[in-house]
Image (cartoon, helix red, strand yellow):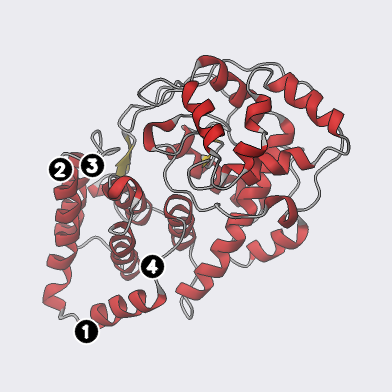
């Protein structure tokens, strides 16, 4: 799924990240056209693209790397998490631009930075700021985006929120369903698959992980920091921008601590029933290929009592946050829940891609 409310809005990328190399990026060969703008329930269709993964030229700030190591993220793990994030967002690609189908105007990049939340503007600005001379920026911009580059890097489009002039121009390059024109789609793909923009995307993601680190250490203070918790926190931050208020988490934990043992599994089943009920409503999207399989598999897990204490806690926290997904008036609440539930349980279907099964439960790494 693409373009959901992402967690990088407001990050001052140009000032927060280490200085990028000042050399003019090489003129990229225009890549094959990526997937067309996908609707919320479209099955992912693998098409040629530059795939997310470790690229030797990408530099990770040593100080940031040391801090992330505290929660078990070395370079290999950082790129593994980056690739994992890209699967529901871009089917594993570095670019996969999409249009306004989800009211975000344009979404692009492995974490689907977008104009709607204000997260795309600092990414574009960071790419622009790496050039010493304006002429070098213009040369690279025009090589990668000869038709729409001036628009994308205009003051109207870099404003947060975007100015109406920018909005009108971009919408004119999309159809009524929010699908990007082929030219705009190709140029965004070329820009976001270029080496220099890969560094910007990696910097943005590392900045996100640093914020996740602070959140994880706060939310799970006094508890072991496991890979499962870190993965859960990353996806929550990417898709919903943050976590439930500390007082709400404390209230939930107090209720869980006081809950009679006989209520434990019926209460969890009620959360799955809530997800299933949402999925059956007329205005829940992104889950059509998944929800029936998920309900059956997760109900099976509850029946087998096949969850440990950490999974039970994370499922409860997932419910707490997912029910506050407000994009398009709650259109994506069921999707928010199933993404995190798949991570927590090691079992689930997201974007039609199924992981694990009831009988395989317990085999996922913590």
- Residue at 43% in and 56% down: 236
Q: Give the labeled residue for mark 1.
A: 258
Q: Give the labeled residue for mark 3.
A: 284
- Residue 79 is left or right of residue 304, and the answer is right
Question: Real-space Cα distance between discs 2 and 1?
Answer: 33 Å
Q: Nearer the viewer, residue 8 or 64?
A: 8
Q: Secondary structure at mark 1?
A: helix
Residue 77 position, x and y percent, is 59, 51
| Mark closer to the chain start, 3 or 1 | 1
Q: Nearer the viewer, residue 114 or 64?
A: 114
- Above or below, 96 against 130 in this view is above
- Above or below, 114 against 309 in this view is above
Q: Residue furthest front?
A: 165
Q: Are marks 3 and 2 in contact (CB under 8 Å)?
A: yes
Question: Real-space Cα distance between discs 4 and 3?
Answer: 22 Å
| Mark closer to the chain start, 4 or 2 | 4
Which numbered mark, 3 or 1, is in the foreground of this view? Answer: 3
């Amino acid at each position: 799924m693409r373009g959901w409310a992402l967690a990088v809005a407001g990050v001052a990328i140009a000032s927060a990240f280490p200085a990028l190399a000042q050399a003019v990026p090489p003129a990229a060969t225009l890549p094959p056209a990526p997937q067309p703008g996908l609707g919320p329930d479209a099955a992912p269709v693998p098409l040629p693209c530059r795939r997310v993964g470790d690229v030797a030229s990408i530099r990770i700030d040593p100080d940031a790397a040391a801090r992330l190591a505290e929660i078990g993220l070395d370079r290999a793990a950082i790129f593994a998490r980056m690739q994992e994030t890209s699967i529901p967002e871009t089917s594993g690609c570095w670019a996969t631009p999409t249009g306004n189908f989800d009211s975000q105007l344009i979404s692009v990049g492995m974490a689907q930075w977008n104009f709607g939340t204000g997260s795309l503007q600092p990414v574009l600005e960071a790419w622009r700021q790496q050039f010493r001379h304006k002429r070098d920026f213009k040369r690279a911009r025009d090589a990668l985006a000869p038709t729409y580059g001036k628009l994308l890097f205009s003051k109207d489009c870099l404003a947060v929120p975007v100015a109406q002039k920018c909005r009108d121009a971009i919408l004119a390059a999309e159809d009524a369903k929010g699908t990007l024109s082929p030219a705009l789609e190709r140029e965004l793909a070329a820009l976001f698959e270029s080496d220099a923009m890969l560094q910007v995307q990696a910097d943005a993601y590392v900045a996100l992980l640093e914020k996740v680190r602070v959140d994880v250490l706060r939310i799970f203070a006094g508890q072991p920091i496991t890979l499962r918790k870190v993965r859960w926190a990353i996806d929550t931050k990417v898709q919903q921008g943050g976590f439930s208020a500390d007082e709400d988490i404390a209230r939930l934990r107090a209720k869980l601590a006081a809950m009679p043992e006989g209520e434990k599994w019926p209460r969890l089943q009620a959360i799955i029933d809530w997800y299933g009920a949402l999925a059956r409503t007329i205005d829940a999207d992104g889950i059509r290929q998944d929800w029936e399989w998920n309900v059956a598999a997760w109900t099976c897990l509850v029946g087998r009592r096949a969850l440990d204490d950490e999974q039970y806690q994370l499922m409860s926290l997932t419910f707490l946050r997912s029910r506050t997904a407000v994009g398009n008036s709650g259109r994506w609440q069921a999707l928010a829940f199933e993404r995190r539930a798949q991570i927590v349980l090691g079992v689930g279907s997201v974007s039609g891609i199924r992981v694990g099964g009831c009988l395989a439960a317990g085999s996922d790494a913590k």
